Structures are given as C-alpha cells and as structure tokens.
Image (tube, grey):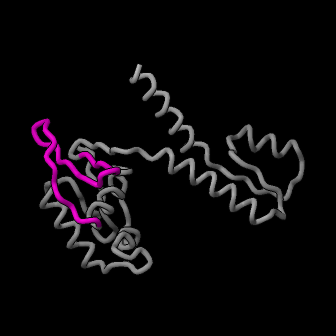
Amino acid sequence: MDELKQKAEESQKEKAIINRVIVMSSEESTDVEIDAYNLGASNFLTKPFDFKLLRSILRKNLGALDDATPDIIKTKFFVLDLKQLKCFKIENEKQIEITLTKIEFKILLNLAVNPGQVKLKEDLIFLGKDESDPMSFKALEMHVASMRKKLGADIIKTKRGVGYFLTTD
C-alpha cells in the first residue's frame, strides 16, 4: 500500500514539473486560449495584463515546483539527502557518509540534478556563500578538487573552458 501511495505522489510531482507554461497573448479570442490550453499551457494571460496577477501565477507555479522537489537524489556514485544536507558515497553497495561544505553540497546538488549535462562555470560561481556575490573561478576549482578527493576523481568531469558535469558511466 505504501508503494502505491509513493508512486501516486511521484506521479503528481512529475505532473507539477512538466506543466509549467504561461502563455501571454494580445489575442482575446477564446479559441486562442483554448488552443493554448490544449497545447499544454498551465496559464493564459491576455495583454495588457495586471502585474499582480502575473506575480500570483508565477508564485503558484514556482510553489508547485518546490513541492515537487525530491528529498533524496540518488546517483550511481552517491546519495544526497536534501533534508539533512548530507552526502553518502556508495562504495561496495554500502553508503558511507562524507562531509561536504555547504558550498560543495550546493555545487554537487546542481550537478546531480542533470547528470551528464555540463554546468557552466559562470553559473556555478554563484553557488558560493553569497549568491549575489560570485566566488572566483579559482575558488570554484578548489571546491571541485576537494569534492573529487572525497567522492573519487572520476565522478566529476571537466569540459575544458566550459564547466563541469557528473559522469553517467
């Protein structure tokens, strides 16, 4: 029974993530609005629109995404517990807790969301202590080097001159 409940919750979370399209149009035709909804829009606004309404719609959509965020991200190499902010390295089918700094955890989480996808250095530098004040590229490289020592050198790959990604092998 718990397994069915979990699958139902996961399905609801997936739907919340997938359907987040807001259509803005100068057309006030009902047919255009119906077409937008039939094509998968979650909301439809006609121009000119009230910014309070737009803000409310954005808040609702972002809230749905927050609700859909998993508590645990599991890869072939490690598990991230997002509630407790802990990382467990998988070694010989056992989970061994490793200590990551807050910045390392944020970087690893950012990479783990889409393994195999390159994350630009220009984006990752904003995951430092103060997200409005980016860390240096050298500081980012030091954090990545530290994570490689803790997780294993082959897990985080470099796309030279571009950024980093998690291996899927």
- Near-viewer residue (34 or 83): 83
Residue 46 pos. (x, y %): 82, 56
- Near-viewer residue (38 or 86): 86
Residue 1 pos. (x, y %): 41, 18
Tell me what residue is drawn at x 69 percent, y 62 percent.
Answer: 55
The residues colored magenta run: 79-102
Q: Is residue 40 magenta?
A: no
State left or right for residue 2 relative to residue 54: left
Where residue 6 sits, quadrant-wise, is top left
- Near-viewer residue (152 or 63): 63
Tell me what residue is drawn at x 69 percent, y 45 percent.
Answer: 41
Residue sitting farthest toward the right: 29
Tell me what residue is drawn at x 16 percent, y 66 percent.
Answer: 146
Relative to residue 146, is residue 88 depicted above or below? above
- Quadrant showing the C terminus: top left
State left or right for residue 119 relative to residue 57: left
Relative to residue 91, is residue 162 depicted above or below? below
Where residue 16 sits, quadrant-wise, is top right
State left or right for residue 90 relative to residue 107: left
Relative to residue 14, is residue 22 depicted above or below? below
- Near-viewer residue (2 or 32): 2
State left or right for residue 67 relative to residue 77: right
Residue sitting farthest toward the top: 1
The total of numbered circles placed on residues is: 0
Residue 66 pos. (x, y %): 50, 51
Residue 5 pos. (x, y %): 45, 25
Tell me what residue is drawn at x 13 percent, y 46 percent.
Answer: 96
Q: Is residue 98 magenta?
A: yes
